[in-house]
Amino acid sequence: MGARRKRHETALQCLYQLDYTQLEDPRRLLDEIELFFKSSERMDIGAKARTYAETVVRGVCAHRLEIDQRLGDQLKTWSLDRLTHIDRALM
């Protein structure tokens, strides 16, 4: 897997887990994701992927209310709470 793809995949997994578990501490979340990668048959995520994911997750945590408001404003026939966790993470 390329480095760029690994960074994006890691960030997406972090955002999914952040939404699913509703964790507020990005460092705890990133530690859990790193443990997942180490415990599975996948390779360690690496420093660049971790740094990128941490930056994305910190940004989402810092602007979560604004992001949710903007997403909610764009939904025509859905409410924000009806979106799946993966859809919210992708958006």
Image (spheres, grey):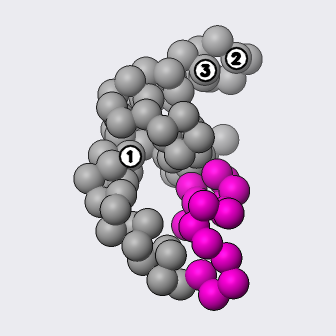
At x 38% / y 24%, what residue is drawn?
Answer: 28
Q: In the picture, residue 43 is in which quadrant?
A: top right
Q: Does any portion of residue 18 appear in the rendered image? A: yes
Q: Is residue 89 above or below residue 27?
A: below
Give the alpha-carbon distance from disc 3 to disc 1, as whole Å: 17 Å
Q: Is residue 55 left or right of residue 14?
A: left
In the rendered image, the quadrant that contains the C terminus is bottom right
Q: Which residues are magenta?
A: 75-91
Dot 3 corresponds to which residue?
A: 36
At x 36% / y 36%, what residue is drawn?
Answer: 24
Circles 2, 3 touching at the beta carbon (< 8 Å):
yes
Label 3 or label 1, whichever comes before in sequence order: 3
| Disc number placed over residue 57 in the picture, else none | 1
The residue type indicated by label 2 comes to Ser
Give the alpha-carbon distance from disc 2 to disc 3, as whole Å: 6 Å
At x 57% / y 67%, what residue is drawn?
Answer: 80
Dot 2 corresponds to which residue?
A: 40
Q: Is residue 40 magenta?
A: no
Indicate the position of residue 56 as horizontal and vertical percent values. 37, 51
Indicate the position of residue 67 as horizontal and vertical percent values. 39, 67
